[in-house]
């Protein structure tokens, strides 16, 4: 069912070892970023994790506007090409790239949610 959050789970393989295949997401948003323009994405209700994918370099910032950084030495830079975030206390994600990019955000809930 589209728009439903899937639990992020890892399953044991046939021999009992942990596999690294994640459950298929049922809630995926996509952003079409213009060059050097921050877009703020609202985290959907109930989401505990997000997995990012993009067709090139993208910067992300939790709860704020993302920026393509120069020298930033106070801990406030945007993260380059994040893979997965725990969304505890995160309500929005700022996204930016120096060139036009397409970004997908696959949202998951925790297994116990």
Image: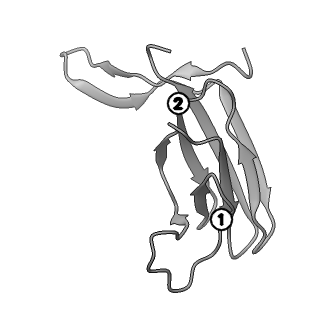
Above or below, 11 relative to 20: above
**Residue appearing at x 72%, y 39% in the figure:** 29
**Residue appearing at x 27%, y 19% in the figure:** 13
Quarter holding residue 28: top right
> In this figure, which residue is indicated by the disc labeled 1?
66
Above or below, 113 relative to 22: above
Tag 2's secondary structure?
Answer: loop
Q: Quadrant of the N terminus?
A: top right
Picture coordinates of residue 11 (x, y %)?
A: 34, 19
Picture coordinates of residue 60 (x, y %)?
A: 59, 59
Instruction: Using a 10 Å C-alpha cutoff, classify the residue at mark 1 as few (fewer than 14 neighbours), some (14 to 19) or many (20 or more).
Output: many
Picture coordinates of residue 10 (x, y %)?
A: 36, 24
Q: Is residue 32 left or right of residue 95?
A: right
Tag 1's secondary structure?
Answer: loop
Instruction: Using a 10 Å C-alpha cutoff, classify the residue at mark 2 as few (fewer than 14 neighbours), some (14 to 19) or many (20 or more).
Output: many
Mark 1 or mark 2, earlier in chain: 2
Above or below, 107 relative to 112: below
**Residue appearing at x 59%, y 58% in the figure:** 61
The number of callouts visible is: 2
Front position in the image: 9 or 96: 96
Instruction: Give the number of the disc on residue 48.
Output: 2
């Amino acid at each position: 069912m589209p728009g439903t959050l899937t639990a992020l789970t890892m399953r044991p393989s046939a021999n009992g070892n942990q596999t690294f295949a994640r459950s298929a997401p049922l809630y995926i948003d996509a952003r079409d970023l213009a060059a050097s323009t921050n877009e703020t994405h609202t985290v959907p209700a109930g989401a505990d994790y997000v997995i990012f994918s993009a067709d090139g370099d993208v910067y992300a910032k939790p709860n704020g506007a993302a920026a393509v950084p120069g020298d930033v030495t106070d801990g406030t830079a945007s993260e380059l090409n994040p893979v997965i975030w725990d969304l505890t206390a995160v309500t929005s994600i700022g996204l930016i790239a120096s060139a036009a990019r397409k970004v997908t955000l696959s949202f998951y809930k925790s297994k116990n949610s």
